[in-house]
Image (cartoon, helix red, strand yellow):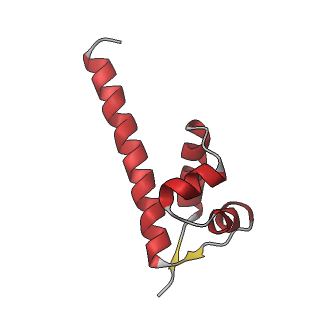
Amino acid sequence: MALYLSENQVTAIKRKRGELNISVLGLSRQLGLSRWTLDNIFRRNHRKVTPATYKKLSDWLIDEYATADIKDSTAAAQGK
């Protein structure tokens, strides 16, 4: 069963990757995905992915945004 990434999901992944200044190769290593899989998603608009790939991308994105929110909340609480 294949799953489909939405344009918003792909844009969010690209944006977060850019904010963190991570190369496609670096992201592929973090996620345990082929760099070619990410390249196909980012450059060739392939949105049909396996459930495992979908989960890895979604989990990474959620973790990155959750971590950023925690850092922002901590900084605000400390008055920075």
79 left or right of 68 in image: left
77 left or right of 65 in image: left
Q: Nearer the viewer, residue 8 or 48?
A: 48
Q: Residue furthest left?
A: 77
At which x and y percent is residue 36?
68, 67
Compared to residue 25, the image places residue 64 above or below, namely above
* Quadrant where the image shows the C terminus: top left
The answer to whether residue 25 is seen in the rendering is yes
Q: Write down the quadrant of residue 68 in the picture.
A: top left
**Residue in view at x 51 percent, y 83 percent:** 2
Q: Nearer the viewer, residue 15 or 51?
A: 51
57 left or right of 14 in image: left
At which x and y percent is residue 56?
44, 64
Q: Residue furthest top?
A: 79
At which x and y percent is residue 20?
55, 38
Q: Nearer the viewer, residue 76 or 27?
A: 27
**Residue in view at x 35 percent, y 35 percent:** 69
